[in-house]
Amino acid sequence: MRGARSYRRYVSNRGRISIAHTLRKNMVYEGIPFDPVLTSRRDEKPRLVVICDVSLSVRNTARFMLHLLYSLQSLFEQVRSFAFVSDLVDVSQYFEQLGLAEAIGTVFSGELLDVDANSNYGRALEIFCQRHLAVVTPQTTVIILGDGRGNRNPPNAAALEAIRLRTKQLIWLSPEPRGSWGPRQFGHAVVRTDLSSCRGGPQSQANWAGSLKI
């Protein structure tokens, strides 16, 4: 998220004199700054949406990612977390209301979704687009975590594209090296999508996590 935190200046009764705003407002006085305009700075935290594969093949990586997100929640304006295997569920409330161990335990318990099913990326992203696409805004970074193994199910790259068109940046994190993605994996469709970032392998993910700068 390097550079994700931003700020916006707005006209205020307090703050610093804005030369540009003052000159523009005082054009009626032939540019003489008779009526100064003050502006203040408002910090804007980034928004984050995470779509996390919690199937058996990526379970350890998913646990690491969910641990990381839990510790970073206070740095974001909003964090929405979604877990999927074949179905997709919103797990945000569990990370907001429960302790770390209990929240992650709930996600992997099988109570919310069948964690032993085969991954179906196309179906999961379709559910996300149908039910939750409104949470993605131009201020939102979307992170998808998964190995791209869709088990011969249609990849539904159109759903991924629909997310990309709404987001500030779309990042794919895979526990497998990018070179290992085969034509039957969802990753084959991903590499044809204009992602902001696409990282493969544990070392790439470690480097990415270490470079987070909010």
Image (spheres, rainbow, N blue to C red):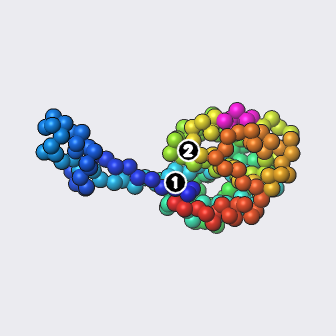
Residue 4 is tagged as 1
Kind of residue at badge 2: Lys
Q: Give the range drawn in magenta.
A: 156-161
| Residue at 77% over, 39% down | 189
Relative to 211, is 154 on the left or the right?
Answer: right
Task: For label 1, count other residues whose C-alpha is less than 10 Å away and answer few (under 14), some (14-19) or many (20+).
Answer: some
Kind of residue at badge 1: Ala
**At numbered mark 1, what does the secondary structure look like: helix, strand or loop?**
loop
Q: Quadrant of the N terminus?
A: bottom right
| Relative depth, front residue between 195 and 186 | 195
| Residue at 52% over, 56% down | 3
Q: Which of marks 1 and 2 is nearer the N terminus?
A: 1
Quadrant position of residue 168: top right
Relative to 43, is 210 on the left or the right?
Answer: right
Residue 31's place in the image compared with 207, above or below, is: above
Q: Residue 63: x and y, percent?
A: 70, 62
Q: Does the magenta stretch include residue 125?
A: no
Residue carrying label 2: 168
Relative to 110, is 135 on the left or the right?
Answer: left
Q: Residue 148: x and y, percent?
A: 78, 47
